[in-house]
Amino acid sequence: MKRYSAFAIAREALSNHMGWERAWAAPQPKAAYDAIIIGAGGHGLATAYYLGKNFGITNVAILEKGWLGGGNTGRNTTIIRSNYLQDSSAAIYEKARSLYETLSQDLNYNAMFSPRGVMMLAQTHHEVRGYQRTAHANALQGVVTEFISPQRVKELCPILNIDGPRYPVLGALWQARGGTGRHDAVAWGYARACSAMGMDIIQNCEVKGITSANGVVTGVETTKGYIGTKKIGIVVAGHSGQVADMAGFRLPVEAVALQALVSEPIKPCMDVVVMANTVHGYMSQSDKGEMVIGGGTDGFNNFTQRGSFHHIEETLRALIETFPIISRLKMLRQWGGIVDMTGDRSPIISKTPVGNCFINCGWGTGGFKAIPGSGWAMAELMAKGEPGPLAAEFDMWRFKEGRFIDESVAAGVAH
Amino acid sequence: MLTLECPYCGVMADETELSPGYEAHLKRYGPGSSDEEFEAYMFARKNPKGVHFERWRHAYGCGKWFLAARDTATLEVFGTYPAQSSAPPQDLQDKIKAKRPDWKGYK
Ligand SMILES: Cc1cc2nc3c(=O)[nH]c(=O)nc-3n(C[C@H](O)[C@H](O)[C@H](O)COP(=O)(O)OP(=O)(O)OC[C@H]3O[C@@H](n4cnc5c(N)ncnc54)[C@H](O)[C@@H]3O)c2cc1C
Ligand SMILES: [Zn+2]
């Protein structure tokens, strides 16, 4: 892999930019690998990357039924934060957020992490108390957040209407080192780094079956033939139930649609991320100037990657009240992703009833922010066969044993 | 927008008139059941990509719960039936089988 740098740009300019290599190879599958990751979204690619980087396991294939990053990773609104209430969530999201800080240097690929600050508005007294409690919990967890006044909210985001008639802003939970990243670049950066380590990323290769002998996985049936392996990591988000079914177990997961939309581009008017959970909407401004908007999920199982129109209307209604300035903006594009919601709305990073078959899913509406930390924890689980401290509490048996990580981590609202 | 016919009042109800209730025909377990049974009732879900049976409530209409058969991969609605049914009516199952020959059947 030729490194990207200012020097490389100058060098390539001299040869009319004809010398750039492709970012990752497009190999055909080998007969067998030490480990197979199913799903080349951010979480699958990050798992493969840290398997190589932290454990030296590089005889790895990442199988993707479509194109890499074409699932939720390429469809999300890229909010990154780690201000969660429970210790186990704060630990893994903060690990992820801190890895994002240096991800571009680590991958030699500009992931455009922009720690512009994330503000979660408190618009009811209940929310004020909830966020104050979270700020205190974060102080104990070593996650830097603070509960700020309505005046400070207005200073940080002047286009916000803090005196709305229905839900005036009573304060906010502020994480100054939260922000956004470039979703595609995160997937592409990990993919390029995995390919450089000799891993095979095989696109247009759908896993159709999982084979096992004596309760331990032996390989996968795919649209490109049978591939043998010693270990499997299932990292397929909305399709987790389908792939788990191939391995022969059932998950506490339902797949529903979550939508997002962007406006026409306008001059810079907002340099923080604002989430308004009471009214169900959140917004930030992309570098191109578009307002990036999201809201709630639909309430029924859906695999079509499109959602219900009335949710868009509800989201915009809420945001126009919060940001009157956007009332005349035209919306340019709208899309949906299929998110995997667990029974307690927290993710699963776990062994499964099948030997050497591991699963990482349930990130639901909020897993972009978790990609580096989740990959880190999943790689440790796959390499050692046992979870490390980051993954330990996210096992799938917690639902049977009542050890919920009860936090609307991936609540159907905002992320 | 999803439209379902309420089997009680006969109204063709828009999604905005309805509240979703997720998977239908779950076997309900309570005190005295094993951990596995209780977990299955509370959390383990079929979540199929294809034919699915679900609970819906005509929340902004007659208020009644009913059941619906729908394809989660195409959003096609096959039909609705009363919540008192312990299994989808046979004629509805036949109709689905005719439209989806690969369907493995209810259960
Ligand atoms: C509209 C929207 C907005 C969001 N906003 C945010 C946000 O602001 N902040 C945040 O943190 N999170 C957000 N999320 C959530 C976030 O996008 C996801 O949690 C995260 O991207 C999940 O990554 P993943 O790698 O697990 O899944 P994906 O990126 O979906 O990757 C899974 C991959 O598996 C592949 N696959 C599936 N089945 C098979 C098979 N049988 N064989 C081979 N490959 C298969 C799929 O094609 C897919 O590419 C949002 C999601 C949506 C939809
Ligand atoms: Zn009715």
Image (cartoon, grey):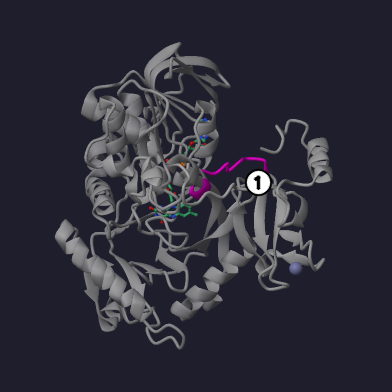
Residue A140 lies in magenta, yes or no?
A: no
Where residue A319 appears, as percent x and y from the top left, is 48, 74
**SS for dot 1:** loop
Looking at the image, can residue A343 be seen? yes
Q: Nearer the viewer, residue A385 or B9?
A: B9
Q: Nearer the viewer, residue A218 or A53?
A: A218
Q: Is residue B12 above or below residue A58?
A: below
Residue plotted at (54% across, 47% down): A255
Where residue A54 appears, as percent x and y from the top left, is 22, 29
Q: Which residue is mark 1?
A: B72
Q: Farthest front residue?
A: B32
Residue plotted at (30% across, 42% down): A372
Q: Nearer the viewer, residue A156 or B70?
A: B70
Magenta residues (range): B41-51
Looking at the image, can residue A108 be seen? no
Q: Is residue A113 above or below residue A138?
A: above
Res. A52 image quadrant: top left
Q: State which quarter of the image contains the N terminus of chain A.
A: top left
Where residue B1 appears, as percent x and y from the top left, is 70, 61
Q: Is residue A351 above or below residue A253?
A: above
Callout 1: CB less than 8 Å from ligand 1: no
Q: Nearer the viewer, residue A323 or A105?
A: A323
Q: For this view, does B24 lie left or right of residue A45?
A: right
Q: Amino acid at mark 1?
A: Thr
Q: State which quarter of the image contains the C terminus of chain A.
A: bottom left
Residue plotted at (42% across, 53% down): A345
Q: Is residue A262 above or below residue A340?
A: below
